[in-house]
Image (cartoon, helix red, strand yellow):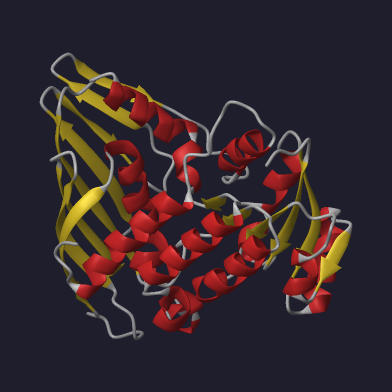
Amino acid sequence: MKFEKVRWGVIGCGNVTEVKSGPAFQKSKNSELVAVMRRNGQLAKDYAERHGVPKWYDDADALINDSEVDAVYIATPPSSHKEYTIKVARAGKPIYVEKPMALNINECNEMIAACKEAGVPLYVAYYRRAMPRFRKIKELLDNQAIGDVRFVSTTQYQKASENVEDSWRVQPEISGGGLFVDMGSHTLDILDFLLGPIKEVKGFTSNQAGKYQAEDIVTGAYLFESGVHGMGNWCFTAYDNVDVNEIIGSKGKITFSTTGNEPVVLTTIDGTKEFDFDMPQHVHQPLVETIVAELTGQSEKCPSTGVSGGRTNMVMERFLNGVVKE
């Protein structure tokens, strides 16, 4: 499957598509956004007019079957990811689906199987895998800047958001869990990118503040296939906002934030070195560029696929369900 230019359609042109993702399809080389869909036709029309998109729909099937749409970005909540992915796959078109990939690992496996059967690629919007700061961390690890990796530690907590109880992100039937699934997934996925797959998990979850149905704190330990150990704490009703990851090795450590723009810090016996990176205006764009490069026959391959996205769903599911190992 090779295109000269990838013509994209978007299902679900909500807030995430305004700046973070939507313009990336228009600004990437050999890529254009030709159609958007939203159930509310007036909102779809408004988005199309504001962003210079030629077509808009209020019916997903119409967009999927548009002969001028080559590939589809699914930007809806996770509860509809499987349905739309299977429809797009059966239409023979590549898919870029928002994270988390689906409600659970069974749905992920169905999506992977449908795309394999149809012979179309499936990409997942864990866009940090293509951002320069995380590629730099990967380079440092690959070059043994901290020696052999021993363990990784994650501490992420934040103040309780106002009116979060009204958000679909804390409704498990729509999101698959709470804010751990929505936000913690980024860290677990980037650790998969940096250190390889996680094979075992021991986790604890609670709802301490009682503001909504889903969990609001998750803690646990995990073991990578490589033998590296990990531990993490995610709390969404704390007094402050903190996001710190440390990868500890035999000769040093790397400190970084998943969501922030703080410098990546390398610490060794020789001292400390900082690496600064600008946050992309459209954070999806570096990953979208790898997808377009792959679909147009360039050498670069997208680092975030259905297989890797499914692994992240599996790890989160083990945390939430108390599953120790496969």
In the visual, does 179 lie left or right of 208?
Answer: right
Percent from the top left, x then y, of residue 132? 48, 31
Measured as percent of width and height from the top left, residue 291 is found at 60, 41
Q: Position of residue 136 (x, y in %)?
A: 39, 27
**Please, is residue 270 above or below residue 34 in the view?**
above
Please report the residue visible at 26 percent of the width from the left and 44 percent of the height from the top.
245
On the image, which quarter does residue 109 sit in? Answer: bottom left
Q: In the rendered image of this protein, does residue 126 appear above or below residue 39?
A: above
Specify the farthest residue to the top. 270
**Residue drawn 23% across the image and 53% down it:** 155
Please say if 318 is above or below 301.
below
Q: Is residue 194 depicted above or below 224 in this figure? A: above
Tell which of 132 and 260 is nearer to you.
132
Instruction: Give the total of numbered labels.
Output: 0
Which quadrant of the rendered structure holds the C terminus?
A: bottom left
In the rendered structure, the answer to whether residue 69 lies left or right of residue 291 reads right
Residue 235 in the image, given as x and y percentages of width and height = 26, 66
Quarter-of-image position of residue 272? top left
Q: Is residue 77 visible?
A: no
Residue 36 located left or right of residue 88: right
